Image (spheres, rainbow, N blue to C red):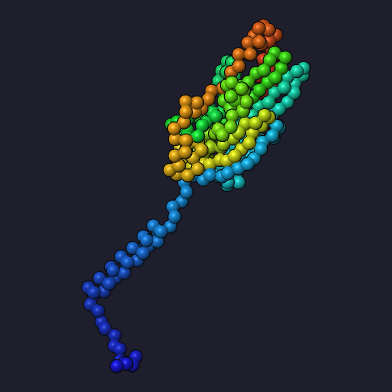
Amino acid sequence: MKRSPSSFKPVNLSDSLCQHLHAYALAASAAGVSLLATAQPGEAEIVYTPANVTIGTNQEYGLDLNSDGIIDFTIKAFGRYFEPVTYINFLAVRHAQKGNKIAAHLAFGLYSGGGFNFAYALSSGIAISKQARHFNAGRATMAWTCECDAGGFYRGSWLSHTSHRGLSNRYLGFQFKINGETHYGWARLNVIYGGALLTGYAYETVPDQGINAGQEQEGDQKGARPGPAAHVQPAQKPATLGALARGSHGLAMWRRRQAAVMAAESPAP
């Protein structure tokens, strides 16, 4: 039998039943919100950016690790001829913002670099964190070569010990600031004569959390077991004895070369 609308009468519910229904509604609502929350994909904690950028002689590239429009580091390639017969090439990286640092070690002495900071050439899988690396440089040399009448001089972790050619698929390690908080990241490069090829970079979005060289996402185990040459020390060449054999004249030439490199690495006024 069909009832007319007027035949329905309101029903008064007891206070206790109202409370039970209200509690049930709240619980159902909370459960629905929870299901919606769990259904959302989790935010990526590592942001990877592929690249294909050639940095040629006397060029530089501003690296913005987190794509916020602020340059974090600058990679610079330099080449110059100095009279009478000296030609210098070097590749270096420097911070572009105060507080940003490069994973590097300080090398002293005639054979190890004369006090330059040398950027580590990290292999895939090497940890980049406060506990694992030295971040003592706002500027670091990757590689530099000098051809002159006293022979060849080759320095830097990004050069092969045997052939003195540039290394490929190695990583710079970075410590940098985002809104005043410390983050870690890397950049992958191939060193070529007179410059470098940037092939990708990444950073960890969680403050103070480390990242592995080459790691492109959380849980990525790529390169988890690096070999013994995971990060190489600066290349050294016995031919530098030629400068010493020339006595004070050879030492004076070496000092001029060092001064030329320092002048080239110094920022423009």
- Residue 129 seen in the current view: no
Identify the residue at image location x=29%, y=93%. Answer: 1
Taking the image as shown, residue 127 lies to the left or right of residue 61, namely left
Give whichever of 114, 153 is nearer the camera.
Answer: 153
Residue 73 image position (x, y, % from top left): 59, 37
Image vertical order of residue 187 relative to residue 239, above or below: below
Image vertical order of residue 66 relative to residue 83, above or below: below
Residue 53 image position (x, y, % from top left): 64, 40
Image vertical order of residue 165 relative to residue 22, above or below: above
Residue 55 image position (x, y, % from top left): 67, 36
Give whichever of 164, 233 is nearer the camera.
Answer: 164
- Residue 32 seen in the current view: yes
Q: How many marks?
A: 0
Residue 49 image position (x, y, % from top left): 56, 44
Residue sitting at the far front? 163
Q: Quadrant of residue 192?
A: top right
Q: Quadrant of residue 262?
A: top right
Taking the image as shown, residue 51 lies to the left or right of residue 213, namely right
Taking the image as shown, residue 117 lies to the left or right of residue 5, namely right
Residue sitting at the far right? 84
Identify the residue at image location x=71%, y=27%. Answer: 79
Identify the residue at image location x=46%, y=46%. Answer: 45
The quadrant in which the C terminus is found is top right
Identify the residue at image location x=53%, y=37%. Answer: 186
